[in-house]
Amino acid sequence: MFHGSMVAIVTPFKDGGVDEEALRELVEFQLQNGTKAIVPCGTTGESATLGYEEHQKVIKICIDAAGGRVPVIAGTGSNCTREAIELTKHARDAGADGALLISPYYNKPTQEGLYRHYKTVAEAVDIPIVLYNVPGRTSVNMLPETVARLSKIENIVAVKEASGNITQIMQIINLCGDDIDVISGDDAMFFPILCVGGKGVISVSANIVPDRIAKLYEAFMSGDMNTARGISNELLRLNNAMFIETNPAPVKAVLSLMGKISNELRLPLTAMSGDNAGKLEALVKEYKIIGE
């Protein structure tokens, strides 16, 4: 259902609030450069520090700006199942095409707890749901067998996999077959995941190089493995640099250098400074993302 280069879009702030004009322009920038879906209010969108009204506002802006040209998959996850249901209902009612739900964080549920959490949300809200496994953020790894159980639920359509474990990802694909699509949650793993049967990526780097991420996917789908592999290798240092400090500080720093947003984050995150900021600026100049 969801495929190709999809962007985990940042939430631009200005003077402490959501910068609606900048967000609309970011969505348009994505659509003009081959992005196949907009994913607001994820980790990169600083969902953890958005109030409920802001959360809904960001989703509505993205839906309106996309104008039906590509799907909008709204981040609606929570470590509280009731809260996840409410956020997902709001996204559905606003017109989102799907919902991305991170595994519950901090409370560290068992595999049975993960299964019941997602099953409860899926049964409560009739919208295509993308599971999101990112154990580095949640401290819980959703195992392939749990994904396979969840894949039998009709409106659970995909899993964003950011475990970094290619063997685990292959196990998911082998266990689930066509019941669920696997989407990379790690830019550096995009090409390898495509090679084992993945369908796309929800990308941080696409915020700044959407055309290159889209071209990688297009080359792969056309059978041009050399071009796809070449782009993947070329982008490796850039992808890694997006995590030189906590995401989304690096990608927001680059977008600021590009003149697209203010370099503003919500506490407890802070803007990059010092050596890392200098290294990042030098790298994006090397990649010709900004001029010398």
Image: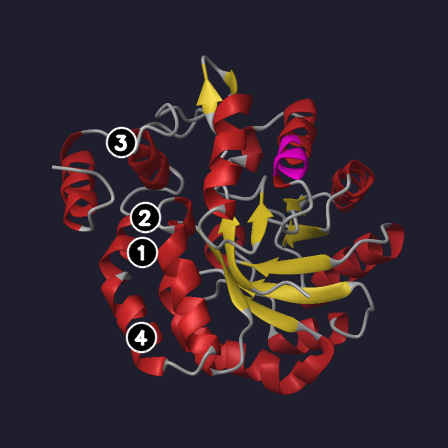
Query: Which class describes the residues within 10 Å of circle 2: few (<14), some (14-19), or many (20+)?
Result: many
Q: Nearer the viewer, residue 289 or 148?
A: 289
The residue indicated by pointer 3 is: 257
Q: CA distance from mark 2 to mark 4?
A: 23 Å
Which tag, 2 or 4, sits closer to the chain's start? Answer: 4
Residue 87 falls in image quadrant: top right
Type of the residue with mark 4: Thr
Q: CA distance from mark 3 to mark 4?
A: 28 Å
Label disc, if present, on residue 239 of the rendered structure: 1
Q: Are marks 1 and 2 in contact (CB under 8 Å)?
A: yes
Q: Are marks 2 and 4 in contact (CB under 8 Å)?
A: no
Number of dots carrying numbers = 4
Dot 1 falls on a residue whose secondary structure is helix
Q: CA distance from mark 1 to mark 4?
A: 17 Å
Q: Relative to residue 141, is residue 56 drawn left or right?
A: right
State the image coordinates of residue 41 (x, y, percent, origin top left).
59, 39
Which tag, 3 or 1, sits closer to the chain's start? Answer: 1
The residue indicated by pointer 2 is: 242
State the image coordinates of residue 67 (x, y, percent, origin top left).
67, 40
Is residue 277 shown to the viewer in this render? yes
Dot 2 falls on a residue whose secondary structure is loop
Which tag, 1 or 4, sits closer to the chain's start? Answer: 4
Q: Nearer the viewer, mark 2 or mark 4?
A: 4
The residue indicated by pointer 4 is: 227
Type of the residue with mark 3: Leu
Highlighted range, magenta: 61-65
